[in-house]
Image (cartoon, rainbow, N blue to C red):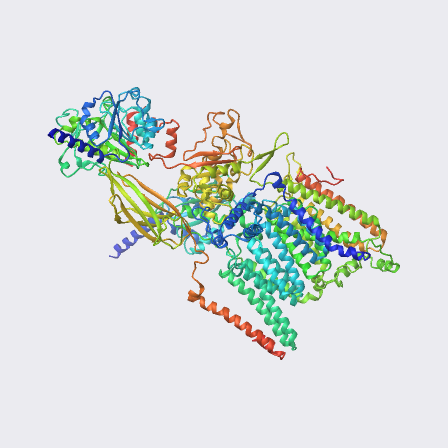
Amino acid sequence: MQLPTSLPPAAANALPLLRTLTLFTIAGAAIASRLFSVVRFESIIHEFDPWFNFRATKYLVANDFYSFLDWFDDRTWYPLGRVTGGTLYPGLMVTSALIFHGLKALTLPVDIRNICVMLAPVFSGLTAYATYLFTREMKDHSAGLLAAAFIGIAPGYISRSVAGSYDNEAIAITLLMFTFYLWIKALKLGSAFWGALTALFYFYMVAAWGGYVFITNIIPLHALVLVIMGRYSSRLYVAYSSWYALGTLASMQIPFVGFLPIRSSEHMGALGVFGLLQLVGFAVYVRARVPSKQFKVLVVGSVGALVVLGVAGIVGLTVSGVIAPWTGRFYSLWDTGYAKIHIPIIASVSEHQPTAWPSFFFDTFMLIWLFPAGVYVVFQELRDEHLFVIIYGILASYFAGVMVRLMLTLTPIVCVCGAVALSNILDIYTNLEKPVEEEEEKKEEKEEASPLKKATTSLIEDEASILSLGSMSKKPLIGVYSNWARGIVLGMFTLYLYMFVQHCTWVTSNAYSSPSVVLASQMADGSQHIIDDFREAYYWLRKNTAEDAKVMSWWDYGYQIGGMADRTTLVDNNTWNNTHIATVGKAMSSREEVSYPILRKHDVDYILVIFGGLLGYSGDDINKFLWMVRIAEGIWPEEVKERDFFTARGEYRVDAEATPTMKNSLMYKMSYYRFADVFGRQPAIDRVRNQRIPSPMQDASAAPIELSSVEEAFTSENWIVRIYKVKELDPFGREHAAATAFESGKKKSGARGRTAPVGGHAKGRARVLRV
Amino acid sequence: MSIRSVLVQLLLVIAFVGNALAISATGSRLLVVLDPSLKDEDYSLFFSDLDSRGLDLTIKAANDPSLGLFEYGERIYDHLILTLPPTQKALGPNLLAKPLLDFSAAGGNIVVVLNANEHALASVREFANQLDVFLPFRDTKLVDHFSYDKEASPLLHDALVLSPNSLLAPEIVSPTADDASKLLYYPGGSAFSLGNNQLLVPVLAAPETAYIYDPAEEATKSETPFATGSQAFLVASLQTRKNTRVTFVASNLLFTNDAFTKPDSFNRAFAAQLSAWTFAEKSVLRLESVTHRLVNSSELNPSIYRVKNEIEYEVELSRFTDGKWAPFYASDVQLEFTMLDPYYRLTLIPSSSSPSAQTYTTSFIAPDQHGMFSFVLNYKRPGLSFVEDKRVVTLRHFGHNEFARSFEIPNAWPYATSIFVVVAAWLLFVALWMFSANSESPSVKKTQ
Amino acid sequence: MRTIQFCVLLLAALFACVVSAAPERDSTYMDKLLKSSSINPGLIRLTDKNFGDVISAPRDYAVVVLLTAESPSMGCQLCRQFAPDYHLVAQSWSKEHPKSGDGLYFAVLDFVDGQRTFQSLGLKTAPNVWLYGPTVGENAGPAAPIVYEIHGVVDMPGSVARFIESHVPGVGITIYKPRDYSKIGQAVTGLVAIGLFIRYLYPILKPFFESRTLWAGISLVAILMFTSGHMFNNIRHTPYVAGNKEGGVSYVAPGFQQQYGFETQVVAVLYAFLAFGAISLSIKTPRIKDSTRQLLSVLTWATIIWCLFSALMFVFRMKNPGYPLSLPPMTK
């Protein structure tokens, strides 16, 4: 930070204290701004995945670590089960378990739920600190503090780290920034110690989040660019080698990762760069030692050949299948059309959609345009670590553009660059000493006025080539003359900063603070009304069904049922088995006669559907229905056809015009069963789709929806959750349809023997018996 | 002490023993709903047989207002014999199709005896239809112009004489060797036809040459009778999935005293066996116990196993005969170990047997596939009550410390050694590097 | 003696003629057609004349007919889109069954060669894929064709193949994507050319490669492109602008998750100017020696940033009406 020289030593000594205070304040602000949901609702775990993490954490706290590692979860994916211990990233759970036990050791028993709820905000405070350190390496303290403040309240990061969103990302971003900081530090100092620290945090990151692949690729890329730019140095060699060797070995200790680091394409870049560095290091070493020119050529040539061989080898192994090709999720980042064709499950997830521009602005207010400025400023003096920022910036913005959820990885670098740019401005315009104008500077300035010449000079004999250090613009920095300029600029940006805080608060409180388990709505008088159907239904399941009851629902609700209702589910949000999900999709989208055998085969006791039609809750199953159909069609293209769910005019309707396939599908029936009765003689309007559900009271032609193989067991207050019980086989060997027909007073083939003429009837009877 | 007292004691003992012996497996309260047009002295033999078997009969007229199967939602009878009055009104509201179904579903056994001279009531026909039994809907007669009873109906040919060998369900009615010569009298009445309900067990079918004759069809000259030949059934039974039993008898005349007392009549034995089966006095199976455990481990029915464990499965089956539970022996009892599809289908081997039950066991190596598996025992044979059992257990994967250690695997030895070799080589290299003074030695080392 | 032989021969010949005169509907006939078909491999080009022969029952083969109108005059876009996929399937089949079709044949009847057929079949639309299954032999089926629905399927060749497999038992079609060697050649030559180009022009190109301004420009452009939602347009193929209800043109898509090409460009330009303003405030202006010029440039850039930022928020409020913040002048 450029201090005015006139600063008294006392003040200079006070600065570190001041910084610490600022950092603590920032951390406080970061935590406080994430508590909206706790204040508004209660200390509760949010939406979907967190519920699994919470459940796993409880398991870990209840048992010891090894039984957690060997945990075979027989409450999900019935009847397949899930080798949970081997298919999750344990970092999050272990962290909160450690905190839990630590506090207990300090005789501070805290409920594990509260720890899980508050974990994300606390770590966001740490993230602010990490960002401070990182940015300090880029520029100086003031930039660091700015960046910390930005990341502390930037909505892009808050979206995944509000209190209660107990997800891997909550701690992953912290680890990401720490790892990057340590990498930069190791690169600067060229010390194996810092390299080892990087590896340590890299290991933690691997244990915490699948997104570690981002680090695994960006650090090698950075190193590669440095080598290509001829900035190879022993510092780079030491830092990278120590990080890669230790980090890879460590990461292979995570069961879920296992041998991926040497078997999958995502990790090959790191390996290749590692090899390259060895070769380059060797070449440099030899070149330094050996005088003869030819020998140098020989060495360089052989090294080059080796590089080519290595690349060819990796490619060959990939083709031959020894190295696994890119996983679908990762591959779909590059070939953006890939997921839609081949992995509908990935495509169906809303957070895997591409990002429209408003969300960029929404998540990082003015930083989004300070971001390029910061990159440019960093280009000014192009130190090795600055290259890292640039690469990170470009890559992250690409990924964020392709997938909404990756806004998360973009936000930190946006904050860093924005801080660099802004602090650069602030430095200049807060520097109060007035420069003096010299005369001879003027004329020199005149003669190099012609723009064309300027351009050529800046391009051709600009000494600030990409390879060299030092500033790009060769004119000396003078400073600001008039206090007006200072006043205007500072005032303007202060206002922007103020608005930034406003923006972040508004976004956080309005967009990112609802725990989607509990919904809130405004009453007419403006008071808040809590809609708690989900928990109502889940607790009903917990209290009123058998301990080992199997509940079938669409996979979105698997984790919640497991976490809140503690019942066995068929599929859940860990979508590892497409076929099983497709089976559920088929059961939902087929006729009862087709679905019932599937339900029996999977021992389903209850079916849970989400229905928003009465309340206008748009995220319900009928709106997700097409995905069930598509996924099922992927496995049984002959039996389930998406086309059949669209009307002749290609509309997706649920009213009288709905196709027969739609009307007979189990999902439709279960959603709208007895829906019309609520409205009596009024038209039954589905408030989500704004369509009239045919109601028998309205027109006699509309037959009421009848369910024969399942019976309604529970419907929540606002009908959001409806639970159906699957009937046993009929004791008298009848079809369910026939049995229900009898119950509802209809005779089984009632005409038999009453009215039908004898001969005709006898014919029919005899024929039936002969077949 | 006189002969009389001895006799009395003897009678008492016999009665007691009789009671103690032949009582139904499900209970002894029997309600007989008697059509007022029938006189119960015509059936005294039949009823006394039932009574002597230890069932306590309650005989009520069909139009008795106090007639009811349930009281406060509880079943008040275990068995029901229903004979049909001419009119629906005479039957009263408590014996409509639904109460009958509920009675059966609630564990009651039913014998429906159609009236030879009246057509079946709508409500009973509806009840029958639910079970895929189709009763004639007019006053029809079963006629056979070839094997009819010469002296009973020389003109109408509607009284048949059948051979006990033509009985279809040995588990329900099984004539003994000397019964074979006897005759089963069918003094008249109609017959019914059966649908495709897989729970139905036909007991007695009409002869090939018989057909159902409808007087009303005289006018129309219809060529298509309601049912013909062996498609017309006289007696059929159904066992529900709740192991309750329902029997339809086409004619009440099968059970009359004079049918019983005809020369070498088989009817009495037939009625006894049929009622005994329907009232769960025979052919009743019971699953005494199901246990599964690790081979040579004491813990019973653990909820979780590991793949490739050796699992032992054991069931005890017993059968109710002559009023007590005896071992049930069969060679075709199977166990399925399934997850969606059976991974194993094993025939259970009869091992030990206690006086009351027969033990079957088998053992197998759990498949190398983790998941929730279930032991499925599904033994369904016509006439026998169904035995079904399903136990879900978890099959977990190998724990991190349950694999073979590397030094136990010969293939791993080269890799293990290579580790130590590398370590040693590195130490050596460092030593050489540090203690070699001259400057070119490092490059030489490196280039090697 | 001779005469008898002669007569016999004659009879035989006659008989042969009679037999051959009867139109044969077995696969040999199709194989002949297949050989004669000069256009793309494995595809029989039908006309009104032989269409009836090909599809007439009884037949011991299955034939897939594409009834299409590819001639540009018809202006059937979908036909021309669909043709290559269909050809690919036929080609893949013929690759596995080079000589004969082995009971499965792919034919195409274009409207120009088959107007009468189109009329007789009463076809109004194109393209149509009709599958005529075998009517004799094992897995014989009805003579009537099965219609393949061309609705929005991705991976068209695959779905056609699956359709055929599902309706003609015992047929497995594996799609061989033809490797386009010319492309590879082009790529290689291109690379070599570029390599040489760099090699010999390096002295001239060097400054460009090493020019920091150039690289900075490139990375800035990339970042601006991505952050202004370019990838969204790329993936979703969003329209540039769209017509609205009252027939006008709407430049800004309603809704938070939608966007048009035009608005992204506007936003990109806004970002660019704002960023450039910040840059010049932090780098350019403090290097201006003349105090008045410096003040002027500071003022201009400050106003530019101010106005554009207000404009940016204005556009954002169009997307998200509930958004509270705004700056003058464009507050409403």
**Residue in front for this viewpoint, A758 or B166:** B166
C303 left or right of C43?
right
Residue B201: percent from left, percent from top = 26, 36
Residue under the image location 53 percent in, 56 percent down:
A326
Q: Quadrant of the C terminus of chain B?
A: bottom right
Give the image quarter of residue C132: top left
Q: How far across and down, in percent of the image, does residue A346 sit?
A: 53, 48
Tell how many labels. 0
Q: Nearer the viewer, residue A256 or C237?
A: A256
Q: As drawn, is A298 to the left or to the right of B119?
A: right
Q: Nearer the viewer, residue B53 or C163?
A: B53
Compared to B181, does C175 lie above or below?
Answer: below
Q: Nearer the viewer, residue A278 or A340?
A: A278
Residue A306 at what x, y percent from top left?
57, 69
Q: Residue furthest front?
A: B1
Q: Residue furthest right?
A: A439
Relative to B144, say whether B409 is above or below: below
Q: Quadrant of the N terminus of chain B?
A: top left
User: Residue most toward the bottom?
Assistant: B438
Q: Residue A393, position in %: x, y?
A: 66, 54
- In the displayed structure, would residue A564 be above or below residue A142? above
> Is residue C120 found left or right of B122 in the rendered image?
right
Is B44 placed above or below A455 here? above
Kindly tell me whether residue A645 is visible in this rendering.
Answer: yes
Q: Residue visible at 45% across and 29% down?
A: A704
Using the rendered image of the protein, determine whether residue C154 is visible from the camera's viewpoint: no
